[in-house]
Amino acid sequence: MRKIHFLPAALLIGMIACNNAGDKAAATSDSSTTAGHDSSMAMAADSGKAAVAALPAVPAGAKVYFKNLKDGQTVKSPFKVEMGVDGLKLDTAGAIVAGTGHHHLLIDAGDSIPAGQVVPKDATHLHFGKAQSSTDVTLPAGKHVLTLQFADGIHRSYGSQLAATITVTVK
């Protein structure tokens, strides 16, 4: 009977001893593995940057425009801004798909964002990544520069080629 109790105890002690030795070996190699893992992660991050598709080409004749506003127009706040695009398909933000993009409205923030640069997101750079083509804008009285800027699925500007700028006077 004593032999039966001894065998499971010996097996248990052996398993614990082997398990701890493996942990020590793993702990010893953890720092080198982590360093290797970190550097391979850095390489993956760098190659991830390289893996981002180039800014899609702008088709010939493509343009953006204000549908309902004219340069120099006087408006009463709040006012509607209707945005149009020809030669490209209006699409939601997210994926980079050639021939598509979405609108951004720059308010008193210049006449365009350089091609390939991500459009900032703040009070003067409004994003319409759900493929919206109109919005209501509330501005204080005075002259304001409005720029319609088209961008790809990850908000990279198509540059001045797909921008339209007007000045409105808010009464």
Image (cartoon, rainbow, N blue to C red):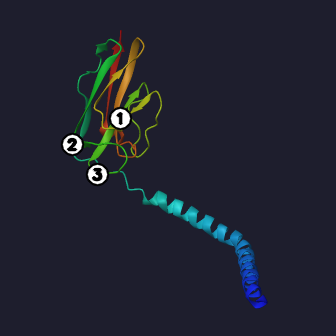
Q: In this view, does 26 lie above or below 84?
A: below
Residue picked out by circle 3: 98
Residue 112, x across and y down, in percent: 38, 34
Q: Specify the label residue 150 is tagged with.
A: none
Q: The residue under label 2 is which amino acid type?
A: Gly
Give residue 53's quadrant in the image.
Answer: bottom left
Quadrant (top left, top right, bottom left, bottom right) of the N terminus: bottom right
Residue picked out by circle 1: 128
Question: What residue sits 31% from the left and 13% below the top?
Answer: 75
* Sequence-first disc among 1 and 2: 2
In the depicted view, which residue is nearer to us: 100 or 116?
A: 100
In the depicted view, which residue is nearer to us: 76 or 160?
A: 76
Give residue 166's quadrant in the image.
Answer: top left
Q: Regarding mark 2 in the picture, which secondary structure is present there?
A: loop
Residue picked out by circle 2: 87
Q: The residue under label 1 is which amino acid type?
A: Phe
Image side of residue 62 versus residue 109, left or right = left
- Say if mark 2 contacts mark 3, CB within 8 Å: no
Local crowd size for mark 3, using a 10 Å CA cut-off: few (<14), some (14–19), many (≥20): some
Give the mark toward the camera: 1 or 2.
1
- Say if mark 1 contacts mark 2, CB within 8 Å: no
Question: What residue sits 46% from the left and 27% below the top?
Answer: 123
Local crowd size for mark 1, using a 10 Å CA cut-off: few (<14), some (14–19), many (≥20): many
Residue 42, x across and y down, in percent: 58, 62
Question: What residue sits 62% from the left and 64% below the top?
Answer: 38
